[in-house]
Amino acid sequence: MSRLEELIEKLCPEGVEYKTIADVCDISRGQVISKDYIRDNVGDYPVYSSQTENNGELGKISTYMFDGEYLTWTTDGANAGTVFYRNGKFSVTNVCGLLKVKTDDLITAFLYYALSIEAHKHVNSGMGNPKLMSNVMSRIKIPVPPLEVQSEIVRILNNFTELTAELTDKLTAELTARKKQYEHYRDELLTFGNDIPVFALNEIACYSKERIDAIEVDEGTYVGVDNLLQNRMGKTLSTHVPTEGRLVKYLKDDILIGNIRPYLKKIWYASNCGGTNGDVLVIRTTSNDVLPIYLYSVLCSDKFFDYNMQHSKGAKMPRGDKEAIMSFNVAVPSLEEQQRIVDILDRFDKLCNDISEGLPAEIEARQKQYEYYRDKLLTFKEKAI
């Protein structure tokens, strides 16, 4: 029998009491903190908002609102119901809810783990904007076992979290290394001597001038900047499909490039026909001497994206210069050599994809394993009152 089982059998064999968040916490929210304020008041104390990236941190300022152990949660938006453990001096914005344990029978870290399970169950997704407001949070019920039981559960989950994070970091580093290796070989294969003819992109390709009605596309055939993936990872299904108007039409084997913030390296080789908008460039080969998939490989290169950034316009939201892009130089070897390069890259790409699919699957498996044990540890029989 584990120590936790011994504690439960000894201290709460008949079950545990469940209490609402209002019973155990003071509930409040943060204040409006603008990005300009953060920029003008740089300091040591983090400001947390609704985002989940970077642990929710927007930046650091010279003052703080709170000091101690708290939980914050995202009140609305796509990440509504996401809970964070905070300890120290910090501030939160108005889109963050704040919980401060007010009773002596609850450990804040235990509350964090319990709410990590429960909070998402109470998010209201109606009206298209998910929300978990204070009035709903206050009614959520959590188990409150004896403090010794809480402490042992926190110890177990802290250790499990640390091990899971360490493994995830290692797997992510391996995946990143394989992708960089692939990009290196691709750039090497696409480096030629002076004996290979070079053409401006507009001599071998053009932008699509065709149009398609919005009603003819769906989540799988509409491509916007939002559903193009960063770092040459293709695309995903669209969640913002237009319902009216005319769109730029793309065909199978066209090359689609996100034209906002070129440094994100959003590019996709079309496997079907569909539509897009003016923020996505649709490039189509016009020369029989160029294989579309070869041109795609060229436009995937760092050389192209660096060129695109050098000629982009705008500071906060740079856009590629469509005219400059068409002046990009492309080396065009024989069709046989193009095919040989494509075949080599295809084999290497499949190898990387096998690793890319395997490693994320391993990371996901570890996360599911963690969540399974967390849920088991935090499931108690409710004590009859």
Image: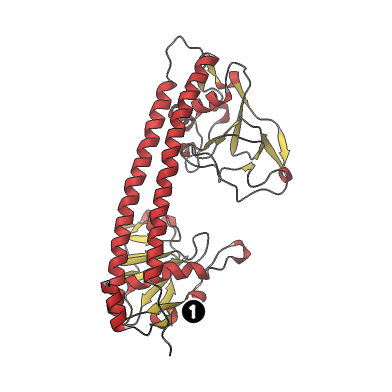
Up/down of 191 relative to 22, above or below:
above
Q: Which x, y percent locates residue 101?
A: 35, 77
Q: Secondary structure at mark 1?
A: loop
Query: Along the line of sight, which residue is nearer the eye, 185 or 38?
Result: 185
Q: Is residue 89 visible?
A: no
Tell me the kind of residue under disc 1.
Arg
Left/right placement of residue 116 relative to residue 289 reads left
The residue under the point 42% across, 21% down is 189
Q: Is residue 178 visible?
A: yes
Up/down of 383 relative to 197, above or below:
below
Left/right placement of residue 254 relative to residue 44 reads right
Q: Which x, y percent locates residue 289?
A: 59, 16
> How many marks on residues?
1
Left/right placement of residue 202 relative to residue 41 reads right
Q: Which x, y percent locates residue 35?
A: 43, 55
- The residue carrying mark 1 is 139
